[in-house]
Amino acid sequence: MKIWLIALVIVSLVGCSDYNDKTTTMQGGKELYENYCAGCHRSRGTGQFLIGVPRIKDTELSLSEIADVIRRQHKDERQMPIFSQLTVPQSYSIASYIKNTLRYK
């Protein structure tokens, strides 16, 4: 009985670790962009005009608008996937990467 109790405590403590949260929230905007966005929008943000994927490197959307589009659905774009599993800071990291880095590539 003691062994089961000790094992349960150890398993529950491991489950409470915030290690995974730290590693995902500390990912940079570039890495997140490459993982979630570049497959459609391309690594330079140029999109794919012929299949309807917009160019985003020179978007006029604000950081908060881009972050909202990433985590929720854009009012005009129903085909873009929603990445609700991303945290707000992660979506802002991607938005910042788009506005501050891709724009100049």
Image (cartoon, rainbow, N blue to C red):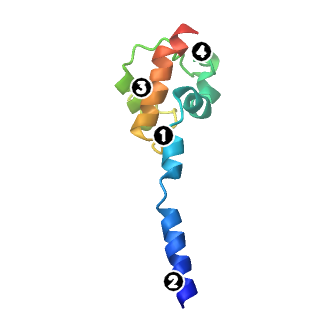
Q: Nearer the viewer, residue 20 or 34?
A: 20
Q: How many residues crowd mark 1 within 10 Å: few (<14), some (14–19), many (20+)?
A: some
Q: Work out which residue is located at the far top of the displayed protein and give it.
A: 104
Would residue 53 be visible to someone looking at this image?
A: yes
Q: Earlier in the sequence, mark 3 or mark 1?
A: 1
Residue at the disc numbered 4? 46
Which of discs 1 and 2 lies nearer the camera? The answer is 2
Residue at the disc numbered 2? 5
Q: Residue at x 45, y 22 (%)?
A: 96
Q: Amino acid at mark 2?
A: Leu
Displayed quadrant of residue 69:
top left
Residue at the disc numbered 1? 25
SS at mark 2 in the image? helix
Q: Amino acid at mark 1?
A: Thr
Would residue 72 be visible to someone looking at this image?
A: no
Does residue 51 appear left or right of residue 19 in this picture?
right
Residue at the disc numbered 3? 66
Q: Residue at x 56, y 78 (%)?
A: 7
Q: Residue at x 59, y 18 (%)?
A: 47
Q: Eyeballing the image, is 91 above or below 16? A: above
Q: Earlier in the sequence, mark 3 or mark 4?
A: 4
Question: Residue 38 location in percent, x, y?
Answer: 61, 26
Tell whether label 4 touches label 2 (CB within 8 Å): no
Tell whether label 2 touches label 1 (CB within 8 Å): no
Q: Earlier in the sequence, mark 2 or mark 4?
A: 2
